[in-house]
Image (cartoon, rainbow, N blue to C red):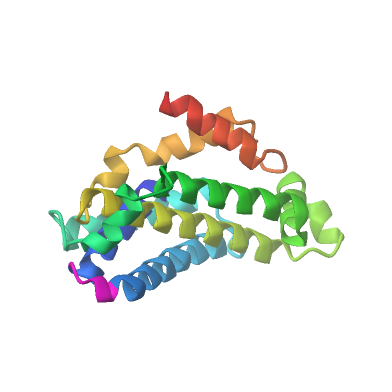
């Protein structure tokens, strides 16, 4: 439930760090993804180590992020250099960069889930954490890693939206409906909220359903 506010924070910080200077693109992107990953790690620790419900933990984190946005950023911030706006408006051989990036992330995620040990462990922990723990899987590390990965993807989404809008917009995540929308698309795609079942293909189908 912190997705919408994390997307907004990532968009605002990306534009704030860049300040229209193409030379600051790489440091800004790295900083935003690092901060997003840190938020994910906090969520993961709250859930895996402190035993807080994922809904409560991420809701609390989201409210903190919303407070930061309300206090520190009240209007569109920073500026995105033209070179970075290529992410939103450029194309490769007629294929929009955004679509190509989505395809790369989807394929990489599907491969990770279906072909790697990390993916197998994620499904195992989602299906039955107690059984996975008895099988020797460090369930807490898997949960934290999942939250970090999800938050980094929120950072990527925020950077894309900043590239699209040309500036950091504090309300872009909330007004875009990314909080409940992000949950709805995976549920429509067949992913169980309890974990252990689902995949990237179904989620992409859910995204397509929402977009038409």
Along the viewing direction, whichever of 203 and 38 lies nearer the viewer:
203
Q: Residue 116's image quarter?
A: bottom right
Residue 85 is situated, as x and y percent measured from the top left of the image, at 27, 56
Q: Is residue 209 visible?
A: yes
Q: Is residue 22 a member of the stretch shown in magenta?
A: yes
Establish if 125 lies above or below 44. Answer: above
Residue 54 is situated, as x and y percent measured from the top left of the image, at 54, 50
Establish if 65 lies above or below 32. Answer: above
Left-right relation of 162 to 93: left
Q: Is residue 53 visible?
A: no
Most extreme residue toward the left is 75
Residue at 67% x, 61% y: name it: 142
Along the viewing direction, whichever of 121 and 50 lies nearer the viewer:
121
> Count of labels shown?
0
Residue at 62% x, 52% y: name it: 109
Establish if 68 lies above or below 62. Answer: below
Residue 8 is situated, as x and y percent measured from the top left of the image, at 30, 52
Residue 84 is situated, as x and y percent measured from the top left of the image, at 29, 61
Residue at 52% x, 54% y: name it: 150
Residue at 22% x, 60% y: name it: 82
Left-right relation of 34 to 76: right
Q: Give the dominant element type of the magenta stretch: helix, strand or loop.
A: helix
The magenta-colored residue range is 20-24
Most extreme residue toward the right is 135
In the rendered view of the protein, which quadrant contains the C terminus?
Answer: top left
Q: Is residue 168 a member of the stretch shown in magenta?
A: no
Establish if 195 lies above or below 205. Answer: below
Left-right relation of 10 to 190: left
Left-right relation of 192 to 1: right
């Amino acid at each position: 439930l912190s997705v919408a506010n994390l997307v907004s924070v990532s968009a605002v910080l990306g534009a704030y760090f860049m300040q229209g200077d193409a030379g600051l693109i790489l440091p800004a992107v790295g900083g935003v993804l690092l901060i997003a990953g840190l938020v994910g790690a906090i969520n993961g620790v709250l859930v895996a180590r402190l035993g807080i419900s994922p809904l409560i933990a991420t809701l609390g984190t989201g409210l903190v992020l919303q407070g930061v946005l309300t206090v520190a950023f009240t209007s569109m911030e920073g500026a995105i250099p033209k070179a970075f706006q290529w992410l939103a408006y450029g194309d490769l051989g007629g294929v929009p960069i955004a679509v190509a990036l989505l395809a790369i992330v989807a394929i990489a995620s599907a491969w990770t889930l279906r072909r790697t040990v990390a993916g197998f462990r994620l499904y195992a922990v989602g299906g039955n954490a107690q059984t996975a723990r008895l099988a020797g899987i460090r369930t807490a590390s898997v949960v934290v890693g999942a939250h970090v990965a999800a938050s980094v993807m929120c950072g990527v989404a925020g950077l894309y939206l900043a590239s699209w809008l040309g500036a950091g917009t504090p309300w872009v995540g909330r007004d875009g409906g990314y909080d409940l929308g992000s949950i709805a698309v995976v549920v429509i795609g067949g992913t169980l909220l309890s974990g252990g079942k689902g995949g990237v293909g179904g989620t992409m189908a859910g995204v397509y359903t929402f977009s038409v």
